[in-house]
Image (cartoon, helix red, strand yellow):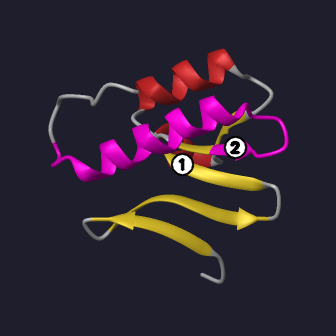
Amino acid sequence: MGHADFRTVGKIFATLPKEGHAMVKLHPEHQHEFMSAEPDAFTPANGAWGRQGCTMVSLTLVKKDTLERAVRAAWQTASTKLSSKKPAPR
């Protein structure tokens, strides 16, 4: 799609869609937690993608340690098999 993406077990868990921004695919509950912690840095993607956990991240506003936790949570969510259990953010 013309931009970098990051995958595990064949699933995309993060992308760099445009300069200064990233997208992480979070469990919806994790999305809410990150958006509550840093509302200026995290916003849901548009439409159904956002409701399913795709979250836009402003790389200029996010704290480094929070971004690290979000990327790990996205990786963990994509790495686990589909189940009702949500992985814990680290």
Give SS at disc 1: strand
85 lies left or right of 55: left
Name the kind of residue labelled 1 in the image.
Val
Q: Which mark is residue 24?
A: 1
Q: Position of residue 24 (x, y in %)?
A: 54, 48
- Residue named by callout 2: 57
- Label count reads 2
Give SS at disc 2: strand
25, above or below 4, in the image = above
The span shown in magenta is 56-82
Q: Which mark is residue 1?
A: none
Name the kind of residue labelled 2 in the image.
Val
User: Label 2 crowding class (10 Å Cα cut-off): few <14, some 14-19, many 20+?
Assistant: many
Residue at position x 65%, y 16% in the image: 37
Say whether marks 2 and 1 touch (CB < 8 Å). Answer: yes
User: Label 1 crowding class (10 Å Cα cut-off): few <14, some 14-19, many 20+?
Assistant: many
65 lies left or right of 30: right
Residue at position x 73%, y 31% in the image: 63
Image quadrant occupied by the N terminus: bottom right
Which quarter of the picture shows residue 39? top right
